[in-house]
Amino acid sequence: MRSTTQSLRNDPIRLSLDEALTTGSPLRLFSLLGRYGGLPGPRPNLDLAIAVGDLLASYQGGAQRLLDAMASLDEREAPAQSPQIFLLIVAAQTFAGRVLVGYEVDRSWQGLQDLAGDPRKPARDGVVHALERLGAKLGGDVLVERLAPWMDGFLQAAVGVEALARRPVLDRLPLSAQGALSGRLEEAIRLAEGARRSDERTQGRRRLLEALAQFLPPILARNPGLLPWLQGWLTAEQPELRETFERCLSGLRRHGLGDDALDPLRGALDTSRPPLRDPTHYKGPTRGRGRKAQRREQRR
């Protein structure tokens, strides 16, 4: 495929976009974006999404109806495994483009937050890419501050944590922002820890725990001054949270932290491990000791 700029200048995408803005009918544009968006597949066409999003952002209010139509596509109109899900990625980049040109900034951040709570993974991934772009251009400290309202919802908090771990964001995160950064991470951890019983097995909470386990290590490896903060959390009692921290410590080792840094963390996690309820009666794992397992043994 030709470069994105060339496509938008000479391709039917540009003509269909003009048509959609003029007539209010986006069907042809949506069809073409789905065709060239690269989904379903391993990589969406981010160059195309950014180019179209920036162009729509330049129209400002003239593209509002088209942006609303893309951002509001539901799971019936744009299933997660369909080409049409690419339209939500374009919407995310349009919101990002509006932030960068200073148009409807607060409303655009809210649009990104709404998309971050979408149950469809490609839509959330599109928001991560948009946040990575914003953090790289505006600074990681700006992103950290803007993510404060995101930490009250599982999926959007997971998106925020993932975005903060992206290399372009970390490269533009000043030391002065470490306090705010630890604040965002602590809010995400508290959200996971304080989940109601009815929320414990939901997609959102599972995704947040996975995001903390996967993305805390690169964040902390680049900001080792936050390791004492993490150590204070390693006395958590909740089993799912402790498992998350176990994975986090393994990830920190893969990111190059040595024993000098990891031993205090490992010690805090190990010493706070809850004891067995009655060690004198503990006989080891119970898996494989039932009647079915015994019959299998007999058949062998």
Image (cartoon, rainbow, N blue to C red):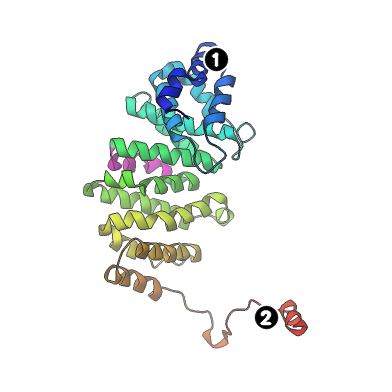
Q: Is residue 290 above or below residue 147?
A: below
- The answer to whether residue 5 is magenta is no
Question: Residue shown at 47%/35% (left/top)?
Answer: 45
Hey, what amino acid is under mark 2?
Arg
Residue 190 at what x, y percent from top left? 42, 55
Residue 249 at what x, y percent from top left? 38, 65
- Which residue matches tag 1? 24
Q: Which contiguous range is marked in magenta?
A: 139-150
Residue 98 visible, this orientation: yes
Question: Residue shown at 53%/79% (left/top)?
Answer: 277
Question: Residue shown at 52%/85% (left/top)?
Answer: 279
- Tell whether 141 sits left or right of 147: left
- Which residue matches tag 2? 289
Q: Residue pushed farthest bottom?
A: 280
- Tell whether 39 sits left or right of 61: right
Residue 152 placement: quadrant: top left
Q: Is residue 10 above or below residue 286?
A: above
Q: Residue pushed farthest front?
A: 2
Residue 72 placement: quadrant: top right
**Secondary element type, mark 1:** loop
Q: Is residue 248 above or below residue 120?
A: below
Q: Is residue 13 above or below residue 234?
A: above
**Secondary element type, mark 2:** loop
Q: Nearer the viewer, residue 65 or 147?
A: 65
Residue 76 at what x, y percent from top left? 65, 34
- The answer to whether residue 149 is magenta is yes
Q: Nearer the viewer, residue 249 or 31?
A: 31
Residue 160 at what x, y percent from top left? 41, 45
Question: Residue shown at 57%/57% (left/top)?
Answer: 197
Q: What is the C-alpha distance between the residues marked 2 and 1?
A: 66 Å
Q: Quadrant of the C terminus?
A: bottom right
Q: Main secondary structure of the magenta part?
A: helix
